[in-house]
Image (cartoon, rainbow, N blue to C red):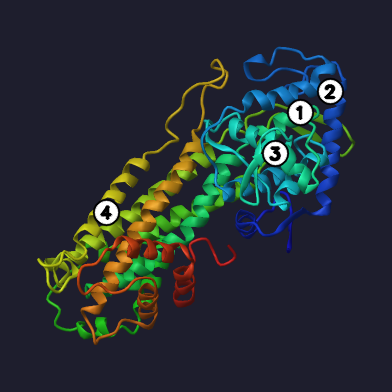
Amino acid sequence: MSVRVLTPGALTLADLRASRVGGVRLALDDAAWGPVRASAAAVQSAAAGDAPVYGVNTGFGKLASQRISPADLAALQRNLIRSHCVGVGEPLAPEVVRLMLATKAASLARGFSGVRPEVVQCLLDVFNAGLIPRVPSQGSVGASGDLAPLSHLTLALMGEGEMWAGGVRQAAGPALERAGIAPLVLQAKEGLALINGTQTSTALALEALLRLDDVFAAAMVSGALSLDAARGSDGPFDPRIHAVRGQPGQVETAAAYRALLAGSEIRASHREGDERVQDPYCLRCQPQVMGACLDQIRHAREVLLREANAVTDNPLVFVEPDGSAAMISGGNFHAEPVALAADALACAIAEVGAIAERRIAMLIDAGVSRLPPFLTANAGLNSGFMIAHVTAAALASENKSLAHPASVDSLPTSANQEDHVSMATFAARRLGAMLDNTTHIVGIELLAAAQGIEFLRPLTSSAALEAVHAQVRVHAPAMPEDHTLAPDIEQAAALVTSGTLTTLLVRATGLSALGSAS
C-alpha cells in the first residue's frame, strides 16, 4: 500500500481525493510534530495552573463559568465525548468518514490545538488500518463545531463506539485491539479539540464536490450530444460572443462545446438551408448556464480546500518563539464558509440537472427536435422516452426544493450562548441526494441523445461524440421498440459516475471542472 505524506496546512485536492477513496496509508510530514508537541506542552502547563482556561479547566458552552478540579480534567474530556454522542440517522458513508479522519488529523497537526502527538497518530492509525468509525449523519447545526458527529468518531477512537472493519459492523474496542491500536485516553483539552471543528460539514461538502466533477463532465458531453441529435447550430458557441461578456466559465465551456462538435457530419449536413434561426435556450445557452455553474464549482473548490487545511477548534494555542504561549477563544468552529459554499454547489447541481431535463423534453418533442415523437419510430404503439422524461422532470423538481439555501436558517442552541449557527452540515449533506438526482437526469439524457443520433444515420457526429455514443451503447442497447428502460437508466447513471466521460472530456477539450491536478 502506497504512503501519502500530508503536509498540514497544505493539503491538495489530490490528497483529499486519495484520502476519500482509501487504499493508501497516510503519514505526516516530519516537520509537523514539533509544533504539535509545543502546543501540547502549553496546554499541560495551563492545566496545571490556577487561571481559568475554557475547555481545559472549565465547563463547556453555557457552563464555561464552572471550574473543574485538576483531578477531574481527564474525566471532563471523557464526559464531553460521551454526552455529545447524540447523533441520529443513517451513518455517514465511508468516504466521508475517511475525509473526516484525514482532515481532523491534518488540522490538529497544525500545532494550534494543544493535543499530544498520540492523538494525531491515533487518527492516522485508524485510517491506515481501514477502520471506519460509525458516525450518525444527523445532529449538527454547523457551529461550535460538528459536535455530535465528531463525538461519535472520537468515541470510537476511545474504544467505546462502533466501527466497520472489513465491512463488518462491530464494537470499536475489539476492532482497535485486532488492529493493534491502543484506545485513545484523552487528556486536558483533547476531547474539545477533537469535536470542536468543521471536519464533518467540510468532508460532506468535499465528497459532493469530488462527485460533481464526473457529473458535470457527463452533462457537458450529453448536452453536446443532444445538440447534434437535434441538429442544433454551433453558432452560439462562437468565441467572439463569449469574449465580449468575459465570464471565465462561459468562455471555457463554449470552447469545450466547439471542440466536442468539431468535425460532425451531422452539423455540416445542415449548415446551409436550415430554416430555424435560433435554437431553444437549452441548446443555445449551454455555455452561459454550464459556465456559470463551473465558476460556482471552482469558487466552492477554493473555499473547501482552504477549510480542509484550516484550524477550526477553540480555544487556540499560540506558542511564541520565546516559548511563551497564549490560549485565545474565538469562533473558527462556525462553518458559515462551508454552508455558503455548499449552497452554491446546490444551485449549480440543480441547474446542471434542470437544463439537462429541458434538453430531454426538447428531444422528445418532434415539433422542436424534428426527430420522431418521443424518439420512437412507431409512436403510439411505442411510447419511447415519454415516461423517462417524466422521471427526469420529477428528479429536477426534487432538486429545486433541495436547493433552497440552508445557510439562511439559524436556530439558537446551548441556552442562547450559541445564538447563530450555520446549518452547514445539512447544507453539505443534502448535496448527496441532489447529485443522485442529477446523475440520473444526465443518464436519461445520454440515452435519449444517443437514440436521437441513430435516427440521423448514416451521418456521423464528431469523433469525440461518436466515442460518447459508443460508451452509451456499451452500457445500454438502442430502443427500436419499447423495452424496460429502468435497467438502462441505472447503467447510464453508472457511466456518468464512472469517470469515463470525464476522461473523454479532458482529452477532447482540455476542460476539467476541478483542475487537472485534482
Q: Earlier in the sequence, mark 2 or mark 4?
A: 2
What whole-number distance in Å separates the C-alpha atoms at marks 1 and 3?
A: 23 Å
> Secondary structure under badge 2?
helix
Secondary element under disc 1, as helix, strand or loop, is loop
How many residues crowd around disc 2 within 10 Å: few (fewer than 14), some, or many (20 or more)? many
Q: Position of residue 33 (x, y in %)?
A: 83, 46
The image quadrant where one finds the N terminus is bottom right
Considering only order in the chain, which callout, 1 or 4, is on the residue closer to the N terminus? 1
Q: Which residue is mark 1?
A: 189
Q: Which residue: 52% across, 36% down?
A: 336
Q: Which mark is residue 47?
A: 2
Marks 1/3 in contact by CB < 8 Å: the verdict is no
The CA distance from mark 4 to mark 3 is 42 Å
Q: Are marks 2 and 3 in contact (CB under 8 Å)?
A: no
Amino acid bearing label 4: Thr
Residue kind at label 1, given as amino acid type: Lys
Judged left or right of residue 515, residue 225 is left
The mark that comes first in sequence, 2 or 3, is: 2
In the rendered image, the vertical position of residue 424 relative to residue 68, given as above or below: below
Cα–Cα gap, marks 4 and 1: 51 Å
Which residue does the numbered mark 3 point to in the structure image? 172
**Is tag 1's residue or tag 3's residue first in the polypeptide sequence?**
3
Location of residue 320 in the rendering, given as x and y in whole percent from the top left corner = 84, 36
Q: Check the image and name the residue furthest to the top.
A: 66
Q: Which numbered circle lies on residue 12?
A: none
Tags 4 and 3 touching, CB below 8 Å: no
Question: 471 or 487, which lies in front?
Answer: 487
